[in-house]
Image (cartoon, helix red, strand yellow):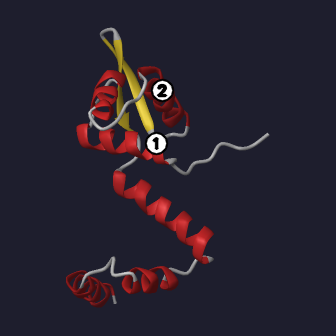
């Protein structure tokens, strides 16, 4: 039996982005937000939000005739953990090859490099 992954899938991350933006939502809110981007079933959103609750990413409370969901973790915490996991799995724990590749592929602009250099100086 496989253990549940604590890493967000692409679809789970898409749902979490909506929830982080809206703060407190029902399944219907998330469904309608996603429906503006692509076709998706209401039951799929409901199932995915249940999975996110099981994984500890969402908290829910009963209100009127619907559950209201809130993020259980801050966006920055989740993204930091996802990045740490990615660097560990793909780059054996070293961020250097990732940064070099980002610069080589021009994902990082000269302005971004200046900001990074300032952040490095400030943290030293």
Left or right of 115: which side holds 73? right
Query: Quadrant where the N terminus lies?
Result: top right
Disc 2 target residue: 44
User: Residue 113: x percent and y percent?
Assistant: 27, 86
Q: Residue furthest front?
A: 39
* Callout 1 secondary element: helix
Q: Examine the image and state in which quarter residue 79 appears.
A: bottom left
Q: Is residue 3 above or below residue 69?
A: below
| Number of residues whose C-alpha sits closer than 10 Å to that of mark 1, classed few (under 14), some (14–19) or many (20 or more) | few
**Mark 1 or mark 2: whose residue is earlier in sequence:** 1
Left or right of 33: which side holds 71? right
| Image point (24%, 37%), residue name | 22
User: Residue 62: x percent and y percent?
Assistant: 37, 16
Left or right of 32: which side holds 52? right
Disc 1 target residue: 11
Q: Is residue 40 above or below residue 14?
A: above
* Frontmost residue, 100 versus 24: 100
| Number of residues whose C-alpha sits closer than 10 Å to that of mark 2, classed few (under 14), some (14–19) or many (20 or more) | few
* Frontmost residue, 47 versus 25: 47
């Amino acid at each position: 039996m496989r253990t549940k992954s604590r890493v967000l899938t692409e679809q789970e991350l898409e749902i979490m982005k909506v929830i982080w933006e809206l703060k407190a939502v029902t399944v219907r809110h998330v469904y309608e937000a996603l429906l503006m981007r692509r076709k998706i079933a209401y039951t799929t959103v409901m199932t995915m939000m249940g999975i996110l609750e099981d994984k500890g990413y969402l908290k829910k409370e009963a209100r009127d005739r619907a559950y209201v969901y809130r993020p259980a973790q801050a966006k920055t915490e989740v993204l930091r953990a996802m990045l740490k996991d990615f660097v560990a799995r793909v780059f054996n724990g070293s961020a250097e090859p990732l940064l070099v590749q980002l610069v080589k592929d021009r994902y990082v602009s000269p302005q971004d490099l200046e900001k990074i250099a300032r952040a490095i100086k400030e943290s030293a």
